[in-house]
Image (spheres, rainbow, N blue to C red):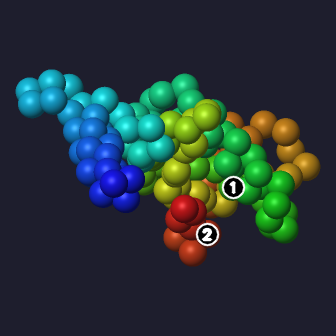
Amino acid sequence: MAVSLRIPVFLLAAMVTVCAARPEEGGSSQPVLGGLEEADIHEKGVNEAIDYAISVYNQENNDLYYSRVLRVVHARKQVVAGMNYYLDLEIGRTSCTKSQSDLAECPFVDQPQEQKVCH
């Protein structure tokens, strides 16, 4: 008898899980925990993630010149224990060497081969 009850209970649990994950008809869809969703590039968290990503990129590469973000191609976020951001950034090399301190005022080099897309 115990074996025959396991399957219906498992199926019932699976149906409850599926129904709970589906948004109601006509209602607003809530983000699913752990699911990816589009992120507004003007959100504070997205901008902090972009600043962090370009900072790490500039520290880790061996180029003598800084790079800056030209354009945010795509931004997504994932709600987990915290927030994960997935960014596609188009970056360009600047004319400022890494010995200079003010990256915000550095002009881009006008050479297309000096641009990259980072995922």
Q: Nearer the viewer, residue 18 or 60?
A: 18
Q: Give the amino acid type for the residue marked by disc 1 in the picture.
A: Ser
Q: Is residue 48 left or right of residue 17?
A: right
Classed neighbour count for the residue bearing mark 1: other residues with Cα under 10 Å, few (<14), some (14–19), many (≥20): many
Q: Residue at x 57, y 62 (%)?
A: 118
Please name the residue that numbered disc 1 is placed on: 67
Q: Residue at x 61, y 33 (%)?
A: 82
Tell me the element at label 2.
Answer: helix
Q: Looking at the image, can residue 37 be seen?
A: yes
Percent position (x, y) of residue 33?
A: 44, 38
Residue 31 lies, with reference to residue 76, above or below; the image says: above
Residue 112 lies, with reference to residue 55, above or below; the image says: below
Q: Is residue 25 left or right of residue 61?
A: left
Q: Residue furthest bottom?
A: 113
Percent position (x, y) of residue 97?
A: 83, 54
Q: Give the amino acid type for the residue marked by disc 2 in the picture.
A: Glu
Percent position (x, y) of residue 63?
A: 81, 66
